Amino acid sequence: MRMNEMLFERTLSVPSKPARLGFLGVGWIGRHRMQAILETGAAEAVAITDPSADMAAEAKKLAPDALLVGSLDELLACDLDGIVIATPSAQHAEQAIKALRAGAAVFCQKPLGRTAEEVAAVVGAAKQADRLLAVDLSYRHTAAMSRIRDVIRSGELGKVFAADLVFHNAYGPDKTWFYDKALSGGGCLMDLGVHLIDMALWSLDFPAIASVSSHLLAAGKPMVADAHQVEDYAVVMLTLEDGAVIRLSCSWRLQAGRDAIIEASFFGTDGGMSMRNVDGSFYDFAAEHFLGTSRKTLLEPPDDWGGRAAADWARRLAAGKKYTSACEQIVKVAEIIDRAYAVSAPLEPG
């Protein structure tokens, strides 16, 4: 067995009867997660829906026996065990709640909601229905982040007192709804910062947050009081109750000389660790261990991590898993994003 398979091999056995799934939204990422789920053998695609007939047809190539239907209601009428949601952000909370109340488990793209209130409502619906809920916070499923978390938990780094995380995307989203706050919930902080916050808190076992400060920019200038404007550069600082500091920065269309800069570094009294993307890649990551002025590479690409969160959810669903309080961590991440937007008050125009 290869190292990456060993790192993420699940103890859950694949049942004789796969989970019956519906796929709501099958653009590129929806189809990628669909393929990762189907490859586990833990689930089958029963029905597919997407506003684009072309996208639906592409998805059907992965599951020729799946029905093509016209709406979420039609999906829910197909006697499903779960639904995979990959639609625009403004629709996530409403669609997830509807599916959960209908008795279907949910795997949803991030963000689960545009605000902590929306996210909490979804988690509440999952708890009430006792259905499995997960969000595609995929970077915690990389081999590099898994190793970093294990080392932090072992105590090898001593007391972790600082963390620096960045996610700079040289391109930015290609869909117009990302740039309308009413539809997206926010800009690069909502799109990319959610991953950074989750990686930091997950690695540190979701510590208590004492304070949040932030500064948001749009087109190189401080944000203005425009209900529809979204930030394309964000800096956020979290101070933990034990005095440790987490610094986050993210952006769209940064002049960075490469496709992307993605890093997560943790510094302790006895050493440090870092996950860094290789050669500007969105997919290839290395993990390093620091001691004084020396460094040691622990992991290098390749690492096929993109569909692991979806595959893990499918395996757990097929094994009969129900609601778990771990999904309440998603609310904590959303609360920090809310606080970051609140404390970075936009300027009045004029």
Image: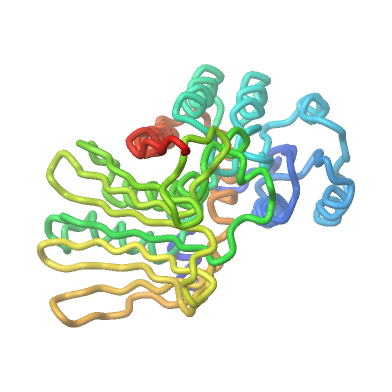
- The answer to whether residue 241 is left or right of residue 115 is left
Q: Indicate the quadrant where residue 48 lies.
A: top right
Residue at 71%, 40% in the rendered image:
17
Q: Nearer the viewer, residue 166 or 153?
A: 166
Q: Indicate the quadrant where residue 249 lies.
A: bottom left
Residue at 59%, 44% in the rendered image:
109
Residue 52 appears in the picture as rendered:
yes
- The answer to whether residue 255 is left or right of residue 314 is left
On the image, the x and y values in percent for residue 135 come to 53, 41
On the image, the x and y values in percent for residue 27 come to 74, 51
Residue at 20%, 36% in the rendered image:
210
Q: Nearer the viewer, residue 171 or 197?
A: 171
On the image, the x and y values in percent for residue 139 come to 46, 57
- The answer to whether residue 335 is left or right of residue 122 is left
Query: How did the renderer colour the structure?
Result: rainbow
Residue at 44%, 52% in the rendered image:
221
On the image, the x and y values in percent for residue 250 come to 43, 56
Residue 48 appears in the picture as rendered:
no
- The answer to whether residue 24 is left or right of residue 112 is right
Please count the marks in the image.
0
Question: Is 92 placed above or below 298 here?
Answer: above
Q: Nearer the viewer, residue 161 or 296?
A: 161
